[in-house]
Image: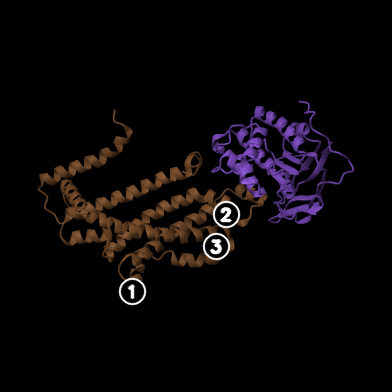
Amino acid sequence: MIPERIKAFLLPISAVVALELWARAVDLQSDSLAPPSAIAAALAAAFKDGSILTATRDTLISAFAGLSIGSAIGLALGIALGIFHIFDRLMEVTIEAIRPIPSIALLPIALIALGFGYRMEIVIVAFACIWPILILSRAAVGGIEPRLIEVSRALRLSPVDRVRKIIIPAALPRIFLAFRLAAGIALIVAVTVEIAINPIGLGAAIMTAQQALRPDLMLAYLLWIGIVGYLLNTGLVVAQRHLFGRAALVGDAA
Amino acid sequence: MRVPSPVRPQPISCIERPQIKFTDVTLTLGGKTIVESINLGVKPGEFLCIIGASGCGKTTVLRLAAGLYQPSRGAVTFDDKPMLAPRRDIAIVFQDYGKALLPWRTAAGNISLALETMGVAYSQRTPRIDELLHKVGLPGHSGKYPAEMSGGMQQRLQIARCLAQEPKALLMDEPFGALDAMTRQGLQDEVLSLVAASRATVIFVTHDLEEAIYLGDRVIGLLPHPGRIGIELK
């Protein structure tokens, strides 16, 4: 019997082995593809010289800073819109007009205003993160069990206590899901900005490898970005279980 | 039929002023009259049961008494003061205990919510929580989350949270409607003892006539469309 956890790895391992066998059989010489063994060797070399760690640090600094700023703005606005319906109606058109703007479309303006480097990337990542957090936290607040609001009214909780003790904890599991979604977006946008224009981080490293006609290194970075994204999501899932504990496991929060 | 527990004191006097008073109360929501011309007085310490078919406005009457709704016409008063908003000395036990408890807080945390709003000092909360849990038959369950408790236990917890408010009046909205017969019977007796000990005025909404007669000093039957007082049994 094959353990359940191993089964999930069977397909990718088989694909890697098949790709390696095929690359060796046809004696692969390509500008865009490389055998898995060459990709692994390039990845190991990038770790050895520390270049991949530096690039990862740069990307993660931008992604986390942008995520933090975007989440704070999105959460504050989302909760306010969820609580105050008048505010929601007032802001509706403005938000719906700004929200569809692709964050990458801000690149030219951000570049002129802020130049190359972390600041420009952080602003664009933050812009991209605001919307999922805002929309989902607004929906999370709007979807709070009405009975809990009645309980808070019956207990005469102050508006601050109502937000602190009822609304935020009740909406938190869904807000955290929004945060997980935004974390993925933050990484994607950070790498995209680096590929498009910013000469730092993993995105820029992929472009450098491409221009050096090093498909093995390019694919090694690509693989590493996937691993970083997977680790980020796994870390957040673990944090979610830890933060919400049994209450999250037994409720509908998970 | 069971005989009511002898520990329950009867209302002190028939000429006593009503603690909760409805004067010609009508409520219209979205153009529809939900309850009409309700005149009702509940004396301090009285246990009033309201019965009626589903949708006849029983819960609406209870919410008006709680200050969760404001009448479209007429007035609801508590101790001769108009009920313009909910009061901390009026506690309400909801039927859907699963929705009324905070799922992210333990049993102790749920009771603590009421104590926090009452301004009880942190150091005094734990002994008070233990006392209340003991009172409602949940000793040793303070660390459990609502979802880890049975329906009966969750309703006991909600009652404990209400008792933490040290209410002058306890409003109960079909509190045992979703429970099995055995649990319901046990809880009915416990509620009688708890209410007797707290001397709170009670309005108890139910659709079960036997339950109403067993628990109540007085039973009022509501007629539907719109809700109005039909019969009164003492």
Q: Amino acid at mark 1?
A: Ile
Helix or strand or loop: what does disc 1 sit on? helix
Answer above or below: position of A216 versus A208.
Answer: above
Which of the two residues, A243 or A25, is positioned nearer the viewer here? Answer: A243
Q: Say which residue appears at 64% left-offset and 30% top-offset.
A: B180
Can residue A102 be seen at all in this image of the molecule? no
Q: Position of residue A21 (x, y in %)?
A: 14, 42
Task: Tell which residue pokes out farthest to the bottom in this image.
Answer: A112
Q: Say which residue appears at 69% left-offset and 39% top-offset.
A: B174
- Dot placed on the residue nearer the N-terminal end, 2 or 3: 3
Q: Amino acid at mark 3?
A: Asp
Answer above or below: position of B174 versus A98.
Answer: above
Q: Say which residue appears at 46% left-offset and 59% top-offset.
A: A72
Instruction: Read off the residue under disc 1.
Output: A112
Q: Nearer the viewer, mark 3 or mark 1?
A: 1
Q: Are marks 2 and 3 in contact (CB under 8 Å)?
A: no
Residues packed near mark 2 inside 10 Å, few (<14), some (14 to 19) or many (20 plus): some
Q: Amino acid at mark 2?
A: Val
Which disc is residue A152 wearing? none
Q: Colour of chain B?
A: purple
- Quadrant housing residue B45: top right
Instruction: Read off the residue under disc 2.
Output: A163
Q: Are marks 2 and 1 in contact (CB under 8 Å)?
A: no
Quadrant for the N terminus of chain A in the image: top left
Residues packed near mark 1 inside 10 Å, few (<14), some (14 to 19) or many (20 plus): few
Which of the two residues, B6 or A5, is positioned nearer the viewer here? Answer: B6
